[in-house]
Image: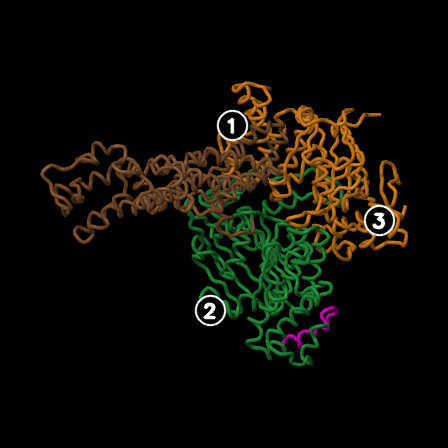
Amino acid sequence: MTEALLSVKGLTKYFPVIKGVVRSRLVGEIKAVDGVNFEVMPGETLGLVGESGCGKTTTGRLVLRLLEPSGGQVYYHDVELTSLRQRDMDRYRQKLQIIFQDPYASLNPRITVGDAIAEPLIAHGMARRRDARERVLRLLDVVGLAPFHYNRYPHEFSGGQRQRVGIARALVLEPEFIVADEPVSALDVSIQAQIINLLERIQAEFGLTFLFISHDLGVIRHISTRVLVMYLGKIVEMAGADDLFAHPLHPYTQALLSAVPSARPGVTRARILLSGDVPSPLNPPAGCRFHTRCPQAMPQCKTEEPIWKEVGHGHYTACHLY
Amino acid sequence: MANSQGTAVATVAVEHGARGALRQYRTRSMLSITLRRLARSYSALWGLCMVCGLILIAVLADVIAPYGPAQIVTGGGSLDLPTWAHPMGLDLLGRDVFSRVIYSSRIAIYVGIVSIILALLPGIPLGIVAGFYGGRLDKLIMAVMDVILAFPIFLLAIVIMVVLEPSTTNVVIALGIVRIPIYARVVRGSVLSVKENEYIEAVRALALSRWRVLFHHVLPNCMAPIIITSTLSVSTSILIESSLSFLGLGTQPPTPSWGWDLKANLVFIDTNPWIVVFPGLAIFLTTLAFNMLGDGLRDALDPRLKR
Amino acid sequence: MRDVLLEIRDLHTHFFTEDGVVKAINGVNLEIASGETLGLVGESGSGKSVTALSILRLIQDPPGKIVSGQILFKGDDLLTYPTARLRRDIRGRAIAMIFQDPMVSLNPVFTVGSQLAEAIYLHQFRDQRAALQQGVEMLREAGAPGLEGLTDLESEPDTGTLWQRALQRGIRMMEAVGIPSARDRVIDYPHQFSGGMRQRIMIAMAISCHPALLIADEPTTALDVTIQVQILEIMKTIKRTFGTSILLITHNLGVIAEMADRVAVMYAGNIVEYTDAPTLFYQPKHPYTVGLLNCYPVVDGPRKQLESIEGTVPDLINPPSGCRFHPRCKHAMPVCQEREPQLQPVADGHLVSCHLYNAGPA
């Protein structure tokens, strides 16, 4: 039984909503992530999919403690990351890296990309200046950029190239685990494909484990080994990628899959239209959070929260239908 | 890419292919882009020239001015109209106005620049601390800054000059103190917005120390407002110094100052209007120069135009 | 015989920037028939948004300028219209446009109702009676469910000022696009609505004057996929009910497959392939189209290796010589570097701009 690389238990993040200027008071909490449990196995790509506001980006940040959790624990191998002090946590950060969504915003515009990638090496004393430069050049090659790009500034690159720089920077400290937060969402389709192929290549070459966050089901399906589906701060379904897309169990997953336009004109999918909008995370619905929009809602769904259980082999969901 | 199509298309257009594409290319650092943009604006270039000219005059005053500032011209009269020998005429005591105007530029530059430095040194760290750490410290610092800011600059300067004795040095101190909150505010605002950028989060993920993040990443991106504020503040400083000297609360004689000359010679305006015109013109041109430069810098450093 | 509503002939739009002249659109020829949905596909830098803006002459000048070409709308060249006429008759009236980001397309300081009413007031009540009449007629013919609310405009008693009536019409449009409790929400501000709702409001504004042509520039790109479905459904209903032609600009091939009758693929300012939707997907000819279709990770069907197109979008100031796609093309031949290919038919109604299919020198 392989041991999980990263495991998350009861992870929660509530954002306080404060009103009032002179005497501020807490009027409510945005329950962005509300009790999330999962494990990431070494070498796999765990896809995390959901629509905007579901909490997937927040989850990615929480796992690396770039945001402090309100509750729950994150374990890396056997170490409880959530209990460490910042200084000790920094030591583990080397192994846990992140690739950001926005290639335009995630690079400091005043620093050349070469220096940006070399900086963590030098700051952590992992290499001296000359060696750092060598390593950076090698990384640039790995991600498909040329040596002369070392001295260029971010604004001189295209979106796809900047994303490559972001990937090189994430690799420079030789991590084991990378959170990829919508790394291709801001890119053109043809560039998306390049970057996805690049990510697959480096995963094989460096033996990396990914938590791949995206709202694009096609991308998730292509790259993930297993997939988690999130809705309004909770995980509603988890399964192997092929299994999930072939046999979605949870009504939300079914609706999500049916909503993706098929790239085949004339072939219309049976569309499951969800009524209404996503409820506010300030006041999530009682019972099953999805019941307000669920086409198969039963009376039980309004009052009781469904239990997470294994329905198929390695296929889990939380729904009263099962 | 839904904003003005011109910008969006231009962005894509000037990007170059991935490796393999051999193109002639000049590295464009922020500095070179800024300088290029600065060079495009006529007013900014004028401003820059005038400022450089002013500094040169101040530095080379000894060489340029035919007479000393307090030197009474032998054989001259008083309140003489401009002649070739004395292009700006003579004042009441027979001193060459031209030389006095030139020497006064030293005071102007001194006051302008030193007061800014005096304001920067405490102002920037205060702004950084307030912006970066936030919370109660931020509220406390800003409260103090607000108190100082509430006073009209000029009034506060007068009060300070009355309390301390009037002198150039005290003017500089007064102006410096009064400016601190402006810098603190500007820097704080800048830090707050830069802090939110994703690249700051990115370097945090790389476990870089807070110091490094602050000085290497946050601060350089805050420089633009600091530079612009400074340039524009210089002109305000000079203006206030001249006003204080005009009221007799600034630079004291025999040190030459445009404001002082303006006041001292005002009564003789019927006899010889020129001795009032030239110091006034000097103040005007200097203020204009720094303003134009400041405006030009503001446009050149405008982040909206950044690619 | 197709009834051609809009025809673009040999359009060239350039941007004069400090780094040089960006030849954003390089000779584009397009046609949209009445009641047809034309999909315009391309990635960033392809010029698709610039094309849309050119039609309505919304290109910022400086730095952009339409340097040559004709845009024939119902036979008249829009490029010769004085701005006043353009504003009165075309923009928002005969041709309406909806944009990508609903967050910034609505003015945040005005209520939604007043923005809707403004659009209706400015365009419709000039010619009040005729417009109402026409709208009601169209609806009667179409007999569309959900849009029934509009039919009782005729019988509606005069409730005061023209503005009031425009506001009421606006409420009805909101109901028509499916905004719940429209009457209550009409006084709300844009930030109180979600992205999907805002986009619906934009659509309501756009169709309130029954345009003949609706230009939709990436209308669903900023939205979640479940909301996207709803928006696309609305657009389909509008098309069915009013017979509006739609110019749908997107980079999402799935949306195109679902919505478009005909498709034009743009690359670096040129149209490289132009045909009807099924042909494009099942028999693509241009290497770029083929590459693009292979880049798409699909949700159904077997998982396949994701092919990508090497290289990046070219520099439009110094575009590659000859065919602009040749540096990235797997099938590039020597002629591709020398001469620009022309858009020529390879089959009935299927045009391709590629030397692989071009029939010899022009």
- Alpha-carbon span between mark 3 and mark 1: 54 Å
Instruction: Name the residue nearer the viewer: C55 or B207.
Output: B207
Image coordinates for residue A117, horizontal then vertical, percent = 56, 28
Colour in which chain B is shown? brown
Q: Which chain is orange?
A: A
Identity, as a three-letter code, of the amino acid under mark 1: Pro
Residue A181: tell me if it is visible.
yes
Q: Which residue bears the numbered disc 1?
A: A147
Work out whether A17 lies above or below B134.
below
Query: From which residue to which does the magenta span run?
Result: C133-147
User: Residue at label 3?
Assistant: A288
x, y (%) of residue A135? 57, 22
Q: Amino acid at mark 3?
A: Cys
Q: Residue A315's x, y, as percent?
A: 85, 39
Residue A89 in the image: above or below residue B145: above
Would you place residue B138 above or below residue A205 in this image?
below
Q: Is residue B232 in sight in this rendering? A: no
Colour assigned to chain C in the rendering is green
Amino acid carrying mark 2 in the image: Ala
Sequence-earlier tag: 3 or 1: 1
Depth-wise, is mark 3 or mark 1 nearer the camera? Answer: 3
Assess disc 1: are there few (<14), some (14-19) or many (≥20) residues with their C-alpha within 10 Å of its C-alpha: some
Which quarter of the picture shows residue B75?
top left
